[in-house]
Image (cartoon, helix red, strand yellow):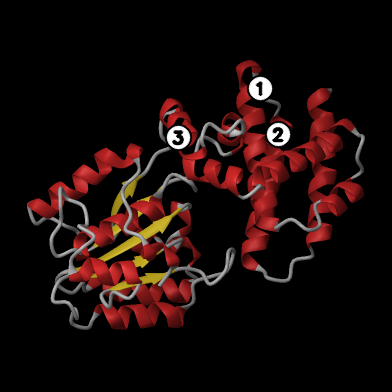
């Protein structure tokens, strides 16, 4: 179990329509056996999955929310509900392995200890390796009664088509900017960093909040100054790579992609330079390499990226 079961969740303000649709499905007994919540990192997929799992396990829901006081809710609050399983990568950037999926599937095939639903959540389901994905298919193909499997994914395309086709997919879009700004101002006490955090987070509220609370926003701004230094020629590729040596490689690629997206969007009014799109392909290749291998030489990878970036920036200025 994760620590997130220590307090009962509520859907976020921008999730109301999806939440209402889930509850209507429960009321008319039309719940699917598997839900796939997908959308950008930071829109609240994990929060919604937990909230709905708790609502389904509650024995005395109040206004379609978990009541927080019944026996089932007390087990949820203690993080020890026997009919709720949560599977996710052991560490950021790691895979979900086949043995863990097999254990989860075995539990799905047992009788619910509390006499109600059995709920299993697979967070970051696109982190399953091929064997783990195949192990999950049987449970998706032959679901047991009163069993619900909820998957979340930032990268829908990375899931096997056979898994996608056996789930009811629910896209969670990035909410309206005004909603995000209002919510972040409320939860942060009108932080001066809200506007910048939203910008570098592509409008994703929880990612913006994380950037503010964790100090990541400052790290991202420092990283973007490195990018701009390479583009202007004031930093060599080697120096830039050394300055980023302690950063997580996956984060670097994500931040670079975000920066490039904003750059292309801004330049798109007058036609973005083709070299930027070529560099985006280079970033995609770097991400695949980082995901497929655990012993990548990050220094060499970064030096190569920054060299390509310097060339792309130079081409864009010609």
Image quadrant of residue 301?
Answer: bottom right
Q: Earlier in the sequence, mark 3 or mark 1?
A: 3
- Residue topped by disc 2: 276
Q: What separation in Å lies between label 2 and label 1 (alpha carbons)?
A: 10 Å
Q: Is residue 160 visible?
A: yes
Query: Residue 126's x, y, as percent?
Result: 47, 61
The secondary element bearing badge 2 is classed as helix
Please tell me which residue lies in front, 167 or 66.
66
| Percent position of residue 30, x then y | 12, 55
Q: Which residue is drawn at 46% across and 76% down?
A: 131
Mark 2 vs 1, N-terminal side: 1
* Tag 1 residue: 267
Residue found at x 74% / y 66% = 296
Left or right of 191? Residue 177 is left
Q: Mark 3, mark 1: which one is toward the viewer?
A: 3
Q: Is mark 3 on a helix, strand or loop?
A: helix
């Amino acid at each position: 179990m994760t620590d997130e079961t220590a307090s009962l969740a509520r859907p976020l303000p921008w999730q109301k329509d999806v939440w209402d649709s889930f509850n209507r499905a429960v009321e008319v007994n039309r719940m699917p056996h598997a839900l796939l919540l997908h959308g950008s990192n930071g829109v609240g997929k994990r929060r919604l999955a937990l909230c709905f799992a708790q609502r389904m396990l509650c024995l005395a829901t109040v206004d379609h929310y978990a009541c927080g006081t019944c026996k089932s809710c007390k087990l949820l609050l203690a993080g020890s509900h026997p009919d709720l399983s949560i599977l996710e990568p052991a560490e950021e950037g790691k895979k979900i392995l086949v043995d863990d999926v097999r254990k989860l599937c075995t539990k799905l095939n047992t009788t619910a200890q509390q006499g109600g639903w059995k709920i299993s959540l697979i967070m970051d389901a696109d982190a399953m390796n091929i064997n783990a994905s195949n192990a999950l298919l049987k449970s998706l193909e032959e679901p047991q009664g009163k069993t619900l499997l909820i998957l979340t994914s930032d990268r829908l395309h990375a899931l096997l088509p056979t898994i996608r086709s056996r789930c009811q997919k629910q896209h969670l879009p990035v909410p309206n900017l005004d909603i995000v700004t209002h919510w972040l101002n409320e939860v942060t006490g009108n932080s001066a960093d809200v506007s910048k955090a939203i910008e570098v987070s592509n409008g994703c509220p929880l990612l913006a909040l994380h950037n503010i609370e964790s100090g990541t926003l400052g790290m991202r701004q420092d990283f973007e100054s490195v990018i701009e230094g390479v583009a202007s020629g004031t930093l060599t590729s080697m120096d830039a790579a050394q300055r980023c040596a302690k950063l997580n490689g996956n984060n670097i690629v994500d931040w670079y992609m975000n920066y490039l997206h904003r750059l292309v969007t801004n330049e798109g009014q007058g036609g973005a330079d083709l070299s930027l799109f070529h560099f985006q392909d280079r970033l995609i290749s770097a991400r695949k390499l980082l995901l497929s291998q655990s012993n990548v030489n990050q220094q060499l990878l970064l030096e190569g990226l920054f060299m390509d970036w310097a060339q792309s920036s130079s081409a864009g200025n010609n």
